[in-house]
Image (tube, rainbow, N blue to C red):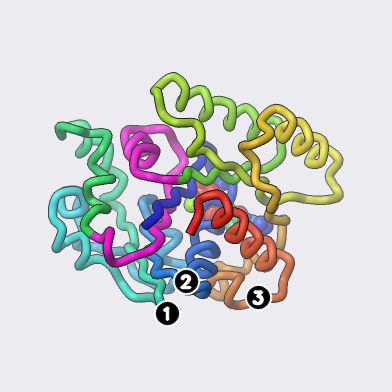
Amino acid sequence: MKIIACYSNKGGVGKTAASVNLAHVFATSGRRVLLCDLDPQGASGFYFRMKPSKKLTEAGFFQDVEKFTGAIRGSDFDDLDVLPANARFRDFDIFLSRMRDDRSRLKKALKAVKGDYDVILLDCPPNITTLSENVFRAADVVLVPVIPTTLSQRTFDQLTDFFRDHDLPTKKLHAFFSMVQGIKILHGETMAAMREASPKRFLEARIPFASEVERMGVHRAPVTATAPASNAARAYRALHDELCDRIGP
Ligand SMILES: Nc1ncnc2c1ncn2[C@@H]1O[C@H](COP(=O)(O)OP(=O)(O)OP(=O)(O)O)[C@@H](O)[C@H]1O
Ligand SMILES: [Mg+2]
């Protein structure tokens, strides 16, 4: 079982879009997938037409296996389950701060479903908190969408520094360019500069800026399901293939 966290300390960069589409691609390629929404905004659940997991409290999530597994729902797609978020997830940090081993609690919680899934995707909220440190410790891969702009470059450098300062393995960090606009010269220049600065960190696959992805909010389904022949869907499949090459079977 592999845990892949779609994470960035920057908001609105395509974490949820990547989580939802990768979850679908992993499931259609024969993996049993759980998409766990850690963001109280609950966007991942929304895209899979689910209501928030109202009954799941912070204590239930981290300390009660039955409540945790009871909140998991089947999606419209085979082999793809979702743990939808709810507003209480915004208090995860307060809850974690009161616990011993407050940085490894998520890893423990996910152990409960270890045998049930081949891949667990975590859709993360955009900040660096105690919850994020839990994510960094639990995940095999921290997958970071980066919009190729100067500000994103700065945010990515901050994340890399955070890993170094906290003795976290930077080899877990895998980034890809998100919402790429081919006609923007600055996008091209920033991608080249960032690849040169961190040659191994960036995947080749890049997600184009595409209206199909924006329309996911209308269809409430992954673009890889509603528009499989689109450039965006192709790009998410390429991202999946490259990730599989990096992390192994
Ligand atoms: N490749 C894309 N092309 C065009 N629009 C996109 C693309 N990816 C995401 N979007 C749109 O950009 C917005 C932010 O995307 P998304 O919700 O995936 O980002 P996020 O990083 O999860 O945001 P947050 O930090 O709020 O959780 C959404 O409206 C989404 O539809
Ligand atoms: Mg999101």
Check disc 3 and report its element: helix, strand or loop. Answer: loop
Q: Nearer the viewer, mark 3 or mark 2?
A: 2
Instruction: Give the magenta part as a residue range.
Output: 113-140
Q: Is residue 6 magenta?
A: no
- Residue 20 is left or right of residue 92, and the answer is right
Who's the residue at 70% across and 49% down the image? 204
Instruction: Locate the N terminus and report the quarter of the image it occupies.
Output: bottom left
- Residue 101 is left or right of residue 28, and the answer is left
Label 3 crowd bin: few (<14), some (14–19), many (20+), radius 10 Å: some
**Above or below — where is 113 with respect to 9?**
below
Residue behind mark 3? 228
Inter-mark Cα distance, 3 to 2: 14 Å
Label 1 crowd bin: few (<14), some (14–19), many (20+), radius 10 Å: some
Mark 3 and mark 2 lie on one chain; the one further toward the N terminus is: 2
Who's the residue at 34% across and 65% down the image? 117
Do the residues under discs 2 and 1 have CB atoms within 8 angstroms?
Answer: yes
Which amino acid does the dot numbered 1 rest on?
Answer: Asp
The mark found on residue 127 in the picture is none
Which amino acid does the dot numbered 3 rest on?
Answer: Pro
Residue behind mark 1? 78
- Residue 135 is left or right of residue 219, and the answer is left
Inter-mark Cα distance, 3 to 1: 17 Å
Who's the residue at 72% across and 56% down the image? 208
Q: Is residue 117 magenta?
A: yes
**Above or below — where is 59 with respect to 232?**
above
Q: Between residues 104 and 83, which one lies in front from this camera angle?
A: 104
Residue behind mark 2? 27
- The spot of residue 47 in percent (x, y) is 48, 68
Check disc 2 and report its element: helix, strand or loop. Answer: helix
